[in-house]
Image (cartoon, helix red, strand yellow):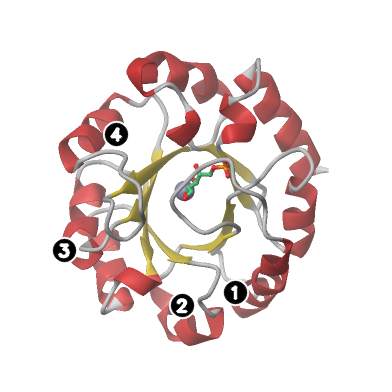
């Protein structure tokens, strides 16, 4: 199925987002947009209107990662606004399958994310509604945290549950030149990288290096 690099703009310069996005767009598969409401996680990034503006201006498809409490109500609107993919947190949803179906019916891919404490086995019944699983490799909320090696067992378990279904397996948090192959070897095929990309002198070159390692 190939691999995808989905850079997160969380650690980009929010005052110059268009030029930050332009640096990575030509070499990225999707742009990873971290939406935080200061309720589900202790951090705030964008309100809905700002997210919609970024989604509509992005030159490449947007992968919206919703770290928000009221996700069952709001997720379909992020799909309707033009996200190519909308990922909800299992922990925030009272009926993940229904919300994933609503995302799909708005024409986006539907993603289901798990925080480090959550077990993939508890969400196996959602599998027919899922286009991507996101296994968090840090506690959601902030960029620049250390990759949690202990999550690799969960990535392997998720890969085995996916079997040969065409479901993407994304990892998010602490992905860098040091960790991307570890996550790939465990079964991940879709890689979020925030600080590794935007704290480097040449973000596009960094994405090329990450891609080369993940593809090898
Ligand atoms: C964290 C976000 C991530 C974040 C990753 O809650 O979901 O997408 O931007 O940042 P790094 O790659 O620096 O860990
Ligand atoms: Zn994210």
Image height of 62 relative to 89, above or below: above
User: Which of pointers 3 and 4 indicates the residue nearer the eye?
Assistant: 3
**Can you identify the residue that label 4 sits on?**
55
Tag 1 or tag 2, which sits nearer the N-term? 2
Left or right placement of residue 70 versus residue 16 in this view: left
Q: Secondary structure under badge 3? A: helix
**Can you identify the residue that label 3 sits on?**
73
In percent of width and height, residue 117 lies at: 53, 74
Mark 2 crowdedness (10 Å alpha carbons): few <14, some 14-19, many ≥20: some
User: Which of pointers 2 and 3 indicates the residue nearer the eye?
Assistant: 3
Tag 4 or tag 3, which sits nearer the N-term? 4
Q: Secondary structure under badge 2? A: helix
Between the residue at mark 2 and the residue at mark 4, the CA separation in whole angstroms equals: 27 Å
Between the residue at mark 3 and the residue at mark 1, the CA separation in whole angstroms equals: 27 Å
User: Which of pointers 2 and 4 indicates the residue nearer the eye?
Assistant: 4
Mark 3 crowdedness (10 Å alpha carbons): few <14, some 14-19, many ≥20: few
Left or right placement of residue 90 versus residue 27 in this view: left
Tag 4 or tag 2, which sits nearer the N-term? 4
**Can you identify the residue that label 2 sits on?**
127
At x 25%, y 37%, the residue is: 51
Q: Which mark is residue 162?
A: 1
Image height of 85 relative to 96, above or below: above
Cβ atoms at labels 2 and 1 below 8 Å apart: yes
């Amino acid at each position: 199925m190939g691999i995808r690099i989905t850079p997160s703009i969380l650690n980009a310069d929010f005052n110059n987002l268009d030029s930050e996005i332009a640096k990575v767009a030509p070499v990225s598969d999707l742009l990873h947009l971290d939406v935080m409401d200061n309720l589900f996680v202790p951090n705030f990034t964008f309100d809905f209107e700002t997210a919609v503006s970024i989604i509509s201006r992005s030159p490449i498809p947007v992968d919206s990662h919703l770290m928000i409490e009221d996700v069952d109500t709001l997720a379909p609107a992020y799909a309707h606004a033009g996200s190519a993919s909308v990922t909800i947190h299992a922990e925030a949803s009272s009926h993940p399958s229904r919300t994933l179906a609503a995302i799909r019916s708005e024409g986006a891919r539907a993603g289901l994310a798990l925080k480090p404490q959550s077990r993939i086995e508890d969400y196996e019944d959602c599998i027919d509604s899922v286009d991507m699983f996101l296994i968090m490799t840090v506690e959601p909320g902030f960029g620049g945290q250390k990759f949690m090696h202990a999550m690799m067992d969960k990535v392997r378990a998720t890969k085995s549950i996916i079997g040969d279904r065409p479901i993407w397996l994304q990892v998010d948090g602490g992905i860098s030149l040091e960790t991307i192959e570890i996550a790939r070897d465990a079964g991940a095929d879709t890689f979020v990288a925030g600080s590794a990309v935007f704290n480097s002198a040449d973000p596009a070159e960094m994405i090329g290096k990450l891609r080369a390692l993940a593809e090898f």
